[in-house]
Image (cartoon, rainbow, N blue to C red):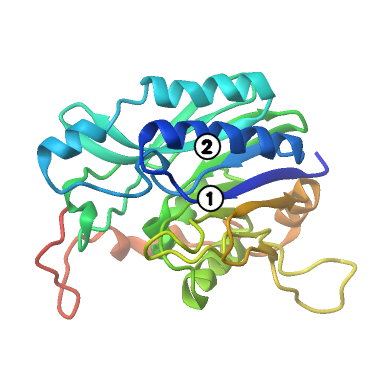
Amino acid sequence: MESLKVALLQILPGTSREENLRKGLDYCRKAKAMGADIALFPEMWSVGYSIPQNADELDAVAMPKDCEFVRAFGEIAKELGMAVGITFLEKHGTAFRNSLCLFDRFGRHVFTYAKVHTCDFGDEHVLEAGEDFYVADLDTEQGIVKIGAMICYDREFPESARILMLKGAEIILVPNACPMEINRLSQLRARAYENMVGIATANYPEGQPDCNGHSSAFDGMAYKPSENSSRDTLIIEAGGREGIYMADFPIDEIREYRRCEVHGNAYRHPKKYQLLLDETINEPFIREDYRR
């Protein structure tokens, strides 16, 4: 596989689920026309990352993963022969989650990932956190690639991308809904570098509250044989405007880099990391709103 093209859909939501459905399907078609293998939406596209705090209102806008809205993106994936990562406010039993559903180019459900690190200091305190991270073989026109996912605040915990790397991820999809400033971009750059993985992030553009665009992609390769020094792993960084931004990952190069470089799981010492399993929280990190 020479390359994998991920379309970062940096687009503004509408004022209703129906409008977001229509616009989302339209942008999937545009992404396919640009040559995309995967189309990735920003975080919680079904509601434009608007989370009601009232229980009845929350129940009214949340949807199960087998609902008509989500199924429509499986159908468009099959129609176009392109994988789609659709994001939505999920109704999960009696609880609600911030989720991404990935469909392959045949419209088959690959996995549904629910955000593990919910922003409990904000509106997401009414949501239930996911329990695990997933990696799956994604069948694309270019071949099989191992795809994982994390969502927005997951980025700020090195463990998220680390677990995905340990499960075999080559590319990590990251729906987002926050200002992508230098420090958050640096987190993504670091996650790609230290795990030797590609990372593709789709954010809302300027005009969406508390968002500024700057969707991005990093290939994780700090060195190339053809270059005499280290390099920036950045593939693309969008500006603030609405649009589709294409991240072209050189998969064969990434795989060769992972076979010979020193990061990822090559020289780790897991037995020396037992403290990472200790759930004790001491000052200055104690927070009243933290949920286990």
Instruction: State the CA–CA distance, disc 1 to disc 2.
Output: 9 Å
Residue at 11% in and 44% down? 54
Q: Earlier in the sequence, mark 1 or mark 2?
A: 1
From the top left corner, tell me how far across and down residue 57 is, in percent. 16, 38
Mark 1 surroundings within 10 Å by alpha-carbon count, few (fewer than 14), some (14 through 19), many (20 or more): many
Give the image quarter of residue 47. Answer: top left
x then y, percent, for residue 177: 41, 57
Secondary structure beneath dot 2 equals: helix
In this rendered view, identify the residue nearer to me: 212 or 38: 212
In the picture, measured across the screen, residue 195 lies left or right of residue 211, that is: right
Residue 79 is left or right of residue 21, and the answer is right
- From this view, report whether residue 102 is shown above or below residue 248: above
Amino acid at the residue labelled 2: Lys
Q: Mark 2: few, some, or many residues within 10 Å (few <14, many ≥20)?
A: some
Q: Would you say residue 125 is visible in this rendering?
A: yes
171 in relation to 32, above or below: below
Of residues 136 and 5, the one nearer the viewer is 5
Give the amino acid type for the residue marked by disc 1 in the picture.
Answer: Ile
When asked about the image quadrant of residue 199, the answer is bottom right
Per the image, the residue denoted by label 2 is 23
Task: Identify the residue position indicated by label 1 in the image.
Answer: 11
Quadrant in which residue 127 is drawn: top left
Residue found at x 48% / y 45%: 149
Residue 126 picture location, percent across and down: 17, 48
At 36% across and 37% down in the image, what residue appears? 16
* Contact, mark 1 vs mark 2 (Cβ under 8 Å): yes
The answer to whether residue 136 is visible is no
Residue at x 30%, y 42% (from the top left corner): 130
Query: Which quarter of the rendered picture does the N terminus lie within?
Result: top right
Numbered label tally? 2
